[in-house]
Amino acid sequence: AEEFIDYKSLYASTAAGLSVDPVEALCASAVKAAIDSKASLIVALTETGSTARMLAKYRPEAPILAITASDSTSRHMLMLRGVVSMPTASFVGTDSVIQKALAEAKRRGMAKSGDVAVCVHGTKEECPGHTNLLKMVIVS
């Protein structure tokens, strides 16, 4: 059934006419970027799971790999459509956390070398509610 879903139209209908806060606007933009670039993966660094939840709201075709340091957040994300949780010890050094996430995504078969991944996180490490950065990276 998933192969018959028109993700571009689904995104457009979900995003149409909404007034959203800056974090949700960034998440919506990340999903749009993933659709437009045919990204194979969306990576979200999330303390509370709200970033992953907002990404999942827009029903991207690409799976969402949600990185969290919280066991309870990891368990809560099991209920989100298209979200796979991955634990981390800390978000300090976000670039290295993203590289570890991409390596894990390759190991799990979620991405392969040369694929595009959209990464979403905050510039303030370990500070919930401040997601404000979107990166497009090539899986190595």
Image (tube, rainbow, N blue to C red):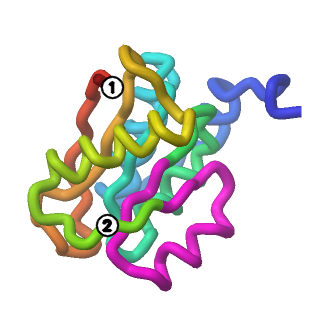
Find residue 139 and name its label.
1
Q: Where the N terminus falls, by quadrant?
A: top right
Left or right for 17, reference 97: right
- Is 55 placed above or below 5 here? below
**Front residue (pair 133, 83):** 83
Q: Which residue is mark 2?
A: 88
- Is 110 placed above or below 55 here? above
Q: Amino acid at mark 2?
A: Thr
**Which element type, helix, strand or loop, lies under badge 2?**
loop
Q: Are the residues flagged by discs 1 and 2 in contact, CB closer than 8 Å? A: no
Q: Residue at x 42, y 56 (%)?
A: 20
**Label located before the other in sequence (1 or 2):** 2
Q: Amino acid at mark 1?
A: Val
| Chain part drawn in magenta | 65-85
- Is 115 placed above or below 23 here? above
**Which element type, helix, strand or loop, lies under badge 1?**
loop
Left or right for 53, reference 138: right
Q: Where the C terminus falls, by quadrant?
A: top left
**Front residue (pair 2, 59):** 2
- Is 93 placed above or below 16 here? below
